[in-house]
Image (cartoon, rainbow, N blue to C red):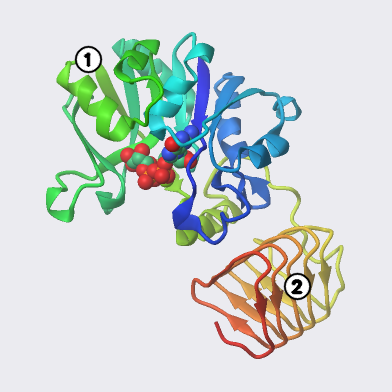
Amino acid sequence: MQSLILAGGKGTRLRPLTMHTPKPIMPIANQPFLLYQLELLKRAEVHDCILSLSYQPQKIEDKLGDGSFYGMRLSYTVEASPLGTAGAYRNAEELIRESTIVFNGDVLTDIDLNEVIHFHREKNAVATIVLVPVPNPTAYGLVETSQDGRIQRFLEKPKLEEVTCNTINAGIYILEPKVLDYIPAGESYMFEYGVFPALLKNQEPFYAYVYDGYWRDIGTSTSYLQANLDVLAEKVKLLHLPARERGEKFDEAIEIDALSLVDSSCTIKAGAQIINSVISRNCYIGEKARIENSVVRGGARLETGAQVRHSVIGKGCHVGRSATIADGAVLGDKSVITDYSQI
Ligand code: GDD
Ligand code: MG
C-alpha cells in the first residue's frame, strides 16, 4: 500500500492565513498540519507517501524534506499549474505501482486506516471512499449508498434542495491503479466531477466506508480555529502534544490554563491570561493581555492590556495596547493594529 496526499490547492477560503503559508503546513496546535495525516498513515504501516503539490511547493518540501525525521519516505510531484484532484493523481502515475490511499490534504481525523484497507480488500473494490455524516452536506460531496455499501450516487456541492442524505465524501480514498485509466493525461480533471461519476456509470466495484468519529476539513478560518481547539481538548486522538506550559517556565504572576499550549520561547509578562489557546514560537504577550479560545502564530506581539478572543493572529502581527480582537477575526501576517483599536 502506498499513499498520495493532494496538497496543491491554493487555500483561498483560508486567506489571508494562506498567503505566505500553504494550507497543508498551516500549524494545528503548533504542528504542521500534514504531520497529522502522516501519523495516520504510519499507524497503518504505510511509510511511502507522494505529496502532490502546486501552490508554494518549496515551502512544503523545505518543511517536510524526505520525511525520514518522521519515519516516512516522502516523494514529491509538482504541477506547473493545478491539474485538479484526479489530474494530480494521474500526474504521479510513474510513482504508482499498487493500491494507494489518497488523502485530501486538509482533512483532520483520527480514523483507523487499517480498517478501511481491510474493508476495501474484502469488497474487492476498485475504489473505496470514506464517508462521514455531517449536518449540512452542501459544502461537500454528497454520497448515496446502498445497504451493502456500494456507492449509488456522487453529487459534489449539492444545492440544499438536492440533499437526500447526510453522508459526505471525507476526502479519503483507496484506489486501485485501474482508476488511472479514467483520468486523461496532462489536463485538469477532478475525482468529484469526472472520475467518480464515471466509475458509477461503468458499474465498477465502488464502495463506501462510513466513519462516525472525529473528522473536520480545516479549509476555512472558522474551521481552522476550531481544529486547533479540538486538538487542545484532545478530541483528536493523534499526535502527543508537547508538554503544555502551565506557568512553571514563566513568571508566577501569569495565568495559563491547563488546555493551552504555549511555546517555551515566548515572553509573557505579569498579569497576562492565556485561556484555551495556542501560542506559537517567539511571541511577546504584554502585561495583563488576555487571550482566549484563539491561535497566535509565531513572532506576534501583543501589547499591555490587549484582548484576543476567538480569533487567529497571523505571524509577526502587532496588536497595540488595550486593542481588542474578537469574534472570529483573522489577522493576516504582519498586520499592525494600533492602540485601543477594536476589531
Ligand atoms: N495537487 C493538487 N492539485 N491538489 C489539489 C488541487 C490541484 O489542482 N486542487 C485541490 N487540491 C487539493 C487541496 O489542496 C485539498 O487538500 C484537496 O485537494 C481538496 O480540495 P479542496 O479545495 O479543499 O476541496 P473541498 O474541501 O471544497 O471539497 C473536497 O473535500 C471535501 C471534504 O473536505 C471534495 O473532495 C469533497 O467531495 C469533499 O466532501
Ligand atoms: Mg477542503
- Asked if residue 243 lies left or right of residue 145, the reply is right
- Asked if residue 54 lies left or right of residue 300, the reply is left
**Looking at the figure, which quarter contains the C terminus?**
bottom right
291 or 91: which is nearer to us? 91
Residue 128 shows up from this direction: yes
| Residue at the image point whose x is 72% and y is 66% from the top | 316
Mark 2 C-beta to ligand 1 under 8 Å:
no
Residue 11 lies, with reference to residue 44, above or below; the image says below
Mark 1 C-beta to ligand 1 under 8 Å:
no
Three-letter amino acid code of the residue under disc 1: Glu
Where in the figure is residue 297, as x and y percent of width and height? 68, 61
Q: Residues within 10 Å of mark 1 (few under 14, many from 20)?
A: some
The residue carrying mark 1 is 204
In the picture, residue 44 is in which quadrant?
A: top right
| Residue at the image point whose x is 22% and y is 15% from the top | 204
Q: Secondary structure at mark 1?
A: loop
Where in the figure is residue 37, as x and y percent of width and height? 55, 35
Q: Secondary structure at mark 2?
A: strand
- Asked if residue 152 lies left or right of residue 48, the reply is left
The residue carrying mark 2 is 301
The span from disc 2 to disc 1 (Cα, nearest Å) is 56 Å
